Amino acid sequence: MAKKNIFVMAMDDFHQAMLERLQGSEEMAFHPLLDMETAVNTTDYEMAELLHRARRTLKDFSGTVDAIVGYWDFPTLSLLPVLRREWDLPGPTLEAALRCEHKYWARVEEAQVAPRQTPRFSSVNPFDENVMDQPPLPYPFWIKPVRAHSSQLGFHVDNQQDFEHAIEQTRDRIQLFARPFNYILGMAELPQEIAAVDGWHCIAEEIVSAGRQCTLEGYVLNGKMDIYGVVDSLREGAVGSSFSRYQYPSDLPASIQEIMIEDCRRFVERTGFDNSPFNIEFFYNEEDGSIWMLEVNPRCSKSHSPLFEMVDGSSNLQAMVDVALGHRPAFPPEGGRYRCAAKIMLREHQNGVVERVPGADEVRAIEDDFPGCHIQVEAEQGCRLSDMLHQDSYSFEYAVLFVGGDSVEEIDHKADQIKARLDFRFTR
């Protein structure tokens, strides 16, 4: 039997190894589509050129193109529906994907299906000469572009001074996302209300921070939605702006998870989103019982992939690939090696120069001493933290730990020991 040819947008070594460990992977062949330097590690997203390169690769391939998938955020998410449509492959329509990607459009749709769970929001034109005269919402609020990623250009606004700073920073840097996103918007059929809020715009949102944040991961296959996991998200920093840890499985009450699942179902049905994995973020306030819908992402979360593999025996890439091939995801019934797992982000909150990072031999030695641990060093020796790509507005992520264990306490103990051995050094 011929293998299914699956093209993976900007496939990196770490995720390729997980793809090759999927259930049924012996019947699949994974091929890179675009490369990391072109589609991820850049600040220059030329969408026409990216599409041209991707099309050329697909057209030049001598076998069948059975699926086109990706786990990265922008611009991967915008390219996938265009390419799938041209190769007549299953996946959400461009408009359905944009109802999730476009932060303002997603809020408009959320407000229709779950008005009590949708924070107040407003569109903002940062280039309006009168934008500083009146805040779009009562202070405090968040403001961010309608399309970005990794919390870039996301600002916590407490007062007029914060608002002016956010607008100035946005005006200076929003073109990174606005130009390429508008290229994709130009290929879609948009309601007039949404077309008026293009990539040069921002969304202001009521702050929802009291309580616990989680992410529901699931997929839609031929109109039927399934949620296969809930991941807790912990934040740090003075304004709770930076993620410190993702932890799976969630320990939220099952009754609360069921309410969130029903909100997901209504959103998916309204948007027509189909034949794709997705994830939706929620806040749950334990004091008053309120539940709030946050961002919607029309993809599986690559940050969660190792967590699912350690606990469930197969990563969430299983859903990405199987759904793209028209199959119900084949997660192994026996599960994985650990009862729980976490992704722990190591961050600096002050700028500085990276004087030392652990070498590859040091990292391997630590991983050998701690089964169920994987370390990703992101900073480079000699670089300035502020020069690192794709950082949020309040911190600098210099390394990541993936740790599995049979309890949260075991994970914490392992993580403390690992961090003590990781010899990072910074100068201010």
Image: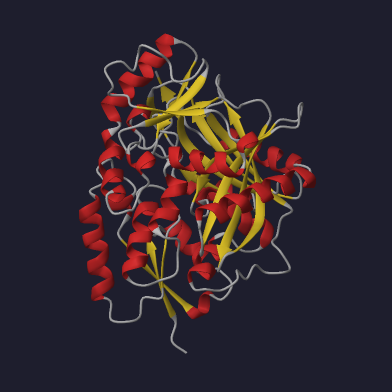
With respect to residue 120, does 190 lie above or below?
below
| Rendered image quadrant of residue 114 | top right
389 on left or right of 110:
left
Q: Quadrant of the C terminus?
A: top left
Q: Position of residue 414 (x, y in %)?
A: 67, 41
Q: Position of residue 369 (x, y in %)?
A: 63, 49
Q: Position of residue 209 (x, y in %)?
A: 61, 26
| Rendered image quadrant of residue 32 | bottom left
241 on left or right of 85:
right
The residue that appears at 49% across and 39% down in the rendered structure is: 108
Residue 283 appears in the rendering: yes
The residue that appears at 32% across and 22% down in the rendered structure is: 169
| Rendered image quadrant of residue 16 | bottom left
Q: Position of residue 392 (x, y in %)?
A: 43, 31
Viewer-proximal residue among 321 and 358:
321
Residue lying farthest front? Answer: 192
The residue that appears at 52% across and 51% down in the rendered structure is: 301
Colour pattern of the rendering: secondary structure
156 on left or right of 45:
right
Residue 37 appears in the rendering: no
Q: How many marks?
A: 0
The residue that appears at 35% across and 66% down in the rendered structure is: 85
With respect to residue 295, does 299 lie above or below?
below
Viewer-proximal residue among 96 and 39:
96
426 on left or right of 53:
right
With respect to residue 77, does 174 lie above or below?
above
Viewer-proximal residue among 146 and 315:
146
